[in-house]
Image (tube, rainbow, N blue to C red):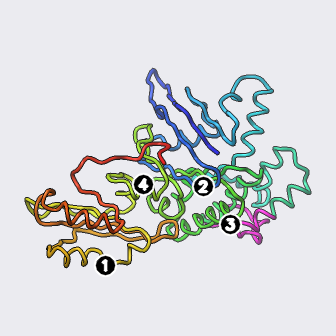
Amino acid sequence: MITTSGLTKVYRARGREVTALDGVDLHVREGEVYGVIGQSGAGKSSLIRCVNLLERPTSGTVTVAGQDLTALAGRGPRAGKELRRARSRIGMVFQHFNLLSSRTVQDNVELPLEILGVSGRERSRKALELLDLVGLADKAKVYPAQLSGGQKQRVGIARALAGDPKVLLSDEATSALDPETTRSILQLLRDLNRQLGLTVLLITHEMDVVKSVCDSAALMERGRIVESGTVSELLATPGSKLAGALFPVGGEATGEDRTVVDVTFHGESATQPVISQLSRTYNVDISILGAAIDTVGGLQVGRMRIELPGRYEDNVVPIGFLREQGLQIDVVGQEPVLVKEGAK
């Protein structure tokens, strides 16, 4: 549904150049919720704004629903009209809501339809239908100042859906909200994804957002995607930075000649007494340095960092036992193998 190829964005100001995007290749499949995560300055906002050409890429291509948007970015009224038509099929939700304070909630939702030339009666019908969809049917006649932050964001989502988009872009849509409201907005996005078949591309700096709603994710650093794949792929990848960030377990070796191992549990294995079986089978004393467990995509997933006495060479058989149980084993200190963009 969304593909970027060699996407580069260079900002020029006061004689300086800053490369925000450095050859980004991104592939978002139809109907999935895809999260792009990274620290401030990683290039996330530039990426999402290039997807709908709010920012013009310096080079590279952006294709949405099979249409090359960068080919529509030329000069002239015809190119501008085609680009506006293409953008109408891409909804966008902003971090700070961007509602017009002088217009009612209903009028805010109607605004995109008004720009598209939809009749007043049809605009009203559509806006009320969308407000009902996001749980604000009773707020149609009030003004944004009378709403909570979560309600304002629901209005923003309804407005983004006004043009019946195939793609919904979310630019840090929950970062200004409290945790409980964040959960409700993320659940709404997931519900809309399922009910309407929307493809959702969201950017965030919060790992909990990825855990809550994302099917796939990408990690950005210094304008590049350094790791990407489905969340389940990433969790099963030795040395994955995203997996480690999703389930930080911490803990360091307590002495020399010790082997530290990260164990990732999926589904049924998360409830099995594998560590105690290992200890009994091989008569080995195991130290648990840290652990984390959560639900991702409806499945229970956990990570545990354990310490085994002796060097790695002394623990090949016990580690092999863990792998035979279907667990993902990552020996801390060994060279990681990362998932690359497009890997299956």
Q: Are marks 1 and 2 in contact (CB under 8 Å)?
A: no
N-term-proximal mark, 4 vs 2: 2
Determine the CA span between mark 2 and mark 3.
34 Å
Query: Residue 219, position in %: x, y?
Result: 43, 47
Mark 1 to mark 3 CA distance (whole Å): 53 Å
| Residue at which label 4 appears | 234
Answer whether labels 4 and 1 touch (C-beta < 8 Å): no
Q: How far is disc 4 from disc 1 in space, using C-alphas? A: 24 Å
Label 2 vs 3, first from the N-terminus:
2
**Segment colored magenta:** 129-148
Residue found at x 73% / y 34%: 83
Amino acid at dot 4: Leu
Q: Which residue is mark 2?
A: 32
Q: Are marks 3 and 4 in contact (CB under 8 Å)?
A: no
Judge the density around disc 4: few (<14), some (14-19), many (≥20) Cα neighbours within 10 Å. many
Residue placed under numbered mark 1 in the picture: 273
Cβ atoms under marks 4 and 2 closer than 8 Å:
no
